[in-house]
């Protein structure tokens, strides 16, 4: 591959929005003394020339998921640790504010790069999802994003749709949304180094990209998690092969070095879990990276020392850690939570003499995208334009609630509501339907009581429902034996889900105990499983409603892919809408479910 400047359209950053206060920041643990000449110029024969060291600003974020407007409820807040050990929450997010913060952070810095760690689109609210995420790509262009890796959600609609988002052109079915205007695509490259076309064996998009400025060269390699096929519908990854993240990054780091690019940043759509949900938690206490766990730890420990920093994502967590590379040298690993609530500001000190990053001088901080700064006018206009197009669909009332229905917890109130809706819809399709199971990753937001627009408090609009369930999965019915049903519950905490459990949300009548003091499959207490008060009969047949993603064995639930007598119904949002309309009114709204079906021990 050539390291020539990328061919994507770029705009000169001629105007910066400098108004507003700086975002709240926490400095990562790896903050060392900068070389004395960093960012300076040297004098020779009466002329300025670049000094040996040049500070390069790397601004990064991840997992935006089309959240152009401020996310609702807990999805639109971050937790901040206070000096006295207490914590507080801060309202955060929304591209009108993200644009202001990024522009303010850049200032007039000519050596500033903005990068992202994947899942910019997919699982998006109605304003973006209804239009196949064209609004989000337009917003990212306006944010002056330079480069991003793909994430698993970039494959929700398949590789052809991802290529359209990159290159432009109107949607093959929906067409052009504005008469006479063709969607132009992304001004930035999507990187997919470890996503190969099965037939050609070559990456489906560029594997890397090189930023250049006055002799400074920084390479970016982009990968998504190898297990993307396990968390995306089979249709979305058809014809694709996903390679190991570490092997891929190391391969292209060598290739970049052969081309004279020695400063390298890996954009990795895979992440970890810090021990605290607070964005300013010190995950380097007591030692480098000791306060973080998950797949990114092993990845960071094995990615070549040729890579100077890792921008990560996928877990929607916030951290700015240092984890030693294979040579034992500290290296920064960052993630900026999700939904545009944070951005990371990392200083990379480039050594012009060696062409490499002076790693001891890397400093990184996560900043909150607070909503106390002026809104970026161009983003306000973009949101208004797409909201006008979405309004006839999005403003329709589909139900009434008496309070916030949260998406937080091992078992969440919104998870119970969705499972109940799918059970009710399943019984319409087949009165013999016994229960419903819902994957937690398919629930993208809470339902909030406070009105978002003019609909009134307690009114659930179609747009709000779409934000909760944006995938357009169908509700499927399948038969399973009691033994298989028990195995499904055990797969929540075993196999690929052993280290990061995926606890299914269950419909009314199904109860059991989850004992977290145990390990593996034993965490599901078999003798506690009851359906309408009766033990599960291993030999009996149960009719189970799930969405099409689970029915295909997604999220590591291989047993759910083995059901029989399949019956495919309408999409899951339609099932939720029908349930809300049939079971609530302005005078008699639905109360938040108690979330007491799963007893959690430990």
Image (cartoon, rainbow, N blue to C red):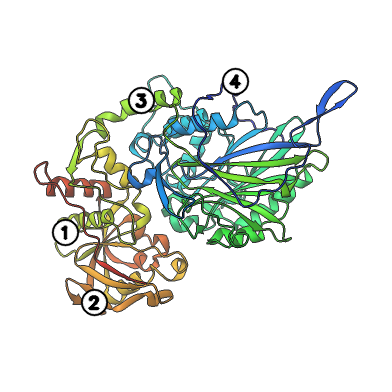
Q: To which residue does mark 3 refer?
A: 384
Q: Looking at the image, do the residues carrying marks 4 and 2 touch, with CB atoms under 8 Å apart?
A: no
Tag 2 or tag 3, which sits nearer the N-term?
3
Q: CA distance from mark 1 to mark 3?
A: 40 Å
Q: To which residue does mark 1 refer?
A: 427
Is label 1 in a helix, a strand or a loop? Answer: helix
Choose mark 1 or mark 2, whichever is in front.
2
Q: To which residue does mark 4 refer?
A: 14
Is label 3 in a helix, a strand or a loop? Answer: helix
Crowding at mark 4 (Cα within 10 Å: few <14, some 14-19, many 20+): few
Q: CA distance from mark 1 to mark 2?
A: 20 Å
Count of picture labels? 4
Crowding at mark 2 (Cα within 10 Å: few <14, some 14-19, many 20+): many
Tag 4 or tag 3, which sits nearer the N-term?
4
- Image position, residue 466 (x, y; %): 30, 42
Identify whether 379 is placed above or below 421: above
Is label 2 in a helix, a strand or a loop? Answer: loop
Choose mark 1 or mark 3, whichever is in front.
3
Q: Name the image quarter holding the N terminus.
A: top right
- Image position, residue 183 (x, y; %): 46, 27
Tag 2 or tag 4, which sits nearer the N-term?
4
Kindly indicate the quadrant of the structure image that contains residue 263. Answer: top right
């Amino acid at each position: 591959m050539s390291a020539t400047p990328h061919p994507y359209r770029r705009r000169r950053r001629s105007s910066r929005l400098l108004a507003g206060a700086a975002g709240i920041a926490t400095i990562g643990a790896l903050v060392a003394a900068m070389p004395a000449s960093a960012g300076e110029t040297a004098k020779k024969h009466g002329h300025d020339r670049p000094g040996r060291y040049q500070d390069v600003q790397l601004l990064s974020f991840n997992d935006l998921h089309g959240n152009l407007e401020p996310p609702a409820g807990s999805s639109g807040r971050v937790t901040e640790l206070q000096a006295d050990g207490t914590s507080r929450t801060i309202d955060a997010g929304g591209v009108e504010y993200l644009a202001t913060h990024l522009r303010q952070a850049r200032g007039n810095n000519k050596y500033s790069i903005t990068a992202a760690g994947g899942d910019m689109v997919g699982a998006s609210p109605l304003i973006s999802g209804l239009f196949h995420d064209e609004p989000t790509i337009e917003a990212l262009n306006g944010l002056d994003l330079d480069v991003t890796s793909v994430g698993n959600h970039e494959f929700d609609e398949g590789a052809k749709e991802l290529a359209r988002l990159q290159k432009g052109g109107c949607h093959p079915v929906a067409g052009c949304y504005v008469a006479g205007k063709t969607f132009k695509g992304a001004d930035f490259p999507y990187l997919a180094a470890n996503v190969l076309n099965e037939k050609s064996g070559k990456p489906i998009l560029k594997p890397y990209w090189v930023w250049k400025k006055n002799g400074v060269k920084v390479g970016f390699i982009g990968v998504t998690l190898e297990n993307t096929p396990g968390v995306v519908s089979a249709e979305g990854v058809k014809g694709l092969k996903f390679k190991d993240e570490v092997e891929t990054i190391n391969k292209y780091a060598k290739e970049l070095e052969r081309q004279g690019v020695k400063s390298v940043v890996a954009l990795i759509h895979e992440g970890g879990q810090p021990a605290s949900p607070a964005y300013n938690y010190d995950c380097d206490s007591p030692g480098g990276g000791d306060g973080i766990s998950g797949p990114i730890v092993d990845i960071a420990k094995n990615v070549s020392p040729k890579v100077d920093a890792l921008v990560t994502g996928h877990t929607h967590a916030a951290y700015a850690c240092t984890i030693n590379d294979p040579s034992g040298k500290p290296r920064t690993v960052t993630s900026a939570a999700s939904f545009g609530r944070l951005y990371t500001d990392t200083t990379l000190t480039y050594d012009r003499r060696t062409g490499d990053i002076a790693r001891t001088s890397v400093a990184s901080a996560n900043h909150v995208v607070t909503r106390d700064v002026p809104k970026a006018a161009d983003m306000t206009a973009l949101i208004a334009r797409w909201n006008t197009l979405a309004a006839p669909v999005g403003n329709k009332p589909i139900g009434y609630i008496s309070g916030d229905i949260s998406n937080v917890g091992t078992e969440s109130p919104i998870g119970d509501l969705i499972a109940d809706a799918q059970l009710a819809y399943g019984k319409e399709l087949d009165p013999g339907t016994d229960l419903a199971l819902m994957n937690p990753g398919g629930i993208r937001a809470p339902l909030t009581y406070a009105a978002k627009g003019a609909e009134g408090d307690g009114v659930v609009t179609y747009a709000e429902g779409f934000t909760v369930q944006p995938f357009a999965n169908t509700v499927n019915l399948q038969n399973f034996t009691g033994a298989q049903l028990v195995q499904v519950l055990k797969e929540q905490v075993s196999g690929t889900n052993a280290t990061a459990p995926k606890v299914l949300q269950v419909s009314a009548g199904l109860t059991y105990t989850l004992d977290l003091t145990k390990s593996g499959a034993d965490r599901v207490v078999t003798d506690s499983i009851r359906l309408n008060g009766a033990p599960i009969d291993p030999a009996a047949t149960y009719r189970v409603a799930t969405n099409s993603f689970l029915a295909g064995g997604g999220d590591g639930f291989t047993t759910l892919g083995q059901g029989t007598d399949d019956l495919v119904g309408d999409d899951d949002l339609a099932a939720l809408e029908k349930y809300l309309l049939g079971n609530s009114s302005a005078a008699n709204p639905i109360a938040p479910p108690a979330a007491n079906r799963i007893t959690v021990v430990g």
